[in-house]
Image (cartoon, rainbow, N blue to C red):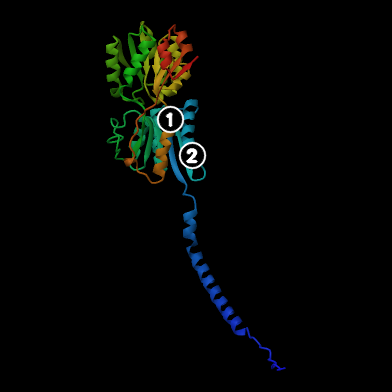
Amino acid sequence: MVSMPVLAPIEYSFEPLRCCLLSLGADMRRREFIGLIGGAAAWPLSARAQQPDRMRLLGVLMGYLESDSAAQSRLAAFRSALSKLGWVEGNNLRIELRWGAGDANMIRTLAKELVELRPDAIFAQSSNVISALARETQTIPIVFAIVSDPIGTGFVTNLARPGGNITGFTNIDPEMGSKWVGLLKELAPRTSRVAVLHNPATAVPLKLLMPSIQAAASSLAIEASAAPIHARNDIEGVIAAHASNPGGGLIVTPDPFNFTNRDLMIAVAARHGVPAIYFDRAHAVSGGLISYGPDSVERFRSAASYVDRILKGGKPAELPVQQATTFELVINLKTARALALDVSTSLLARADEVIE
């Protein structure tokens, strides 16, 4: 048998490998450390990019009385729409809210006050409120709701491209006056005279509405005349004077003053037995005979979309003015009965809402 040589055990040394790994580890730790330092230096920029948008300031000037439930419903619709678009009050949005109570002098004072806060944008409603704001600023973006004649009042140069710092949503078609006359005559056939109630300081300019009112009145053998009301104390006298002869009727025009004082106007008209048509659903709900006009809550809700776009960098000059497309016909049957008026089935069928 051949004997095999006995081999000596092989000794392996891991020291060079350990030193290499330690050296490599040190290099890696150095790179990680350097990377950490570099990352820390860059962290504030990336952190800022991940933070929510800065708090934006939105001014809101309502021409109505703060205690008015209908006005509060409109404002709630606006706020709700903003919230759905990601604007959370107290988080990324602060609202400075003012109420003008249908008073032209107060509205001018509040407009100046809001502009001095230098908000990112202002939301408001009605022509007289926007006029007050426009006198105070030509730079702060303004979004309006329920303004009747933005071109005639000089708020915008044209509807498609407003061209300045103001844009928004209209509420009145100039031909709406003929609709009011026709509906009033249909509901109260004995109407032979109509008085157009308005406050010159706060109302839609009558030059916008009177041509269509007078044209329709003439075709129906009705005499139409303007009836200015300058203060709340004038309401009783103006309506009473118009009711002194038979055949009188009233058209109550879009106007923060008329909206704010609607309960008194409705009560006086009822006391004197005068049929009246109003521009807003809130009047019929409050006891007015009939109303025809745009869905004001929808106008406020839509305006939130423009405020959202402006707060995100959009320019009002490039946001087209949008005209009202949804109108509501509301009839108060209880009031019609009190005035001994028969409401035809065809008129009832056309109504969007009938109040029993």
Which labelled disc corresponds to residue 298? 1
- Residue 342 image position (x, y, % from top left): 43, 7
Q: Residue at x 36, y 14 (%)?
A: 183
Few, some or many residues within 10 Å of mark 2 (<14, 14–19, 20+):
few
Q: Position of residue 289 (x, y in %)?
A: 43, 14
123 to the left or right of 226: right
Q: Position of residue 248 (x, y in %)?
A: 36, 9
Residue 227 seen anywhere in this rendered image of the structure: no
Quarter residue 137 falls in: top left
| Amino acid at dot 2 | Lys
Can the viewer see residue 134? yes
Residue placed at 37% from the left, 41% from the top?
141
Going by the image, does 90 lie left or right of 137? Answer: right
Give the side of residue 316 with respect to residue 36, left or right: left
Q: Earlier in the sequence, mark 1 or mark 2?
A: 2
Q: Which residue is mark 2?
A: 84
Distance from Cα at disc 1 to Cα at disc 2: 15 Å
Q: Residue at x 43, y 30 (%)?
A: 298
Pinpoint residue 98: horizontal percent, then vertical percent. Answer: 45, 34
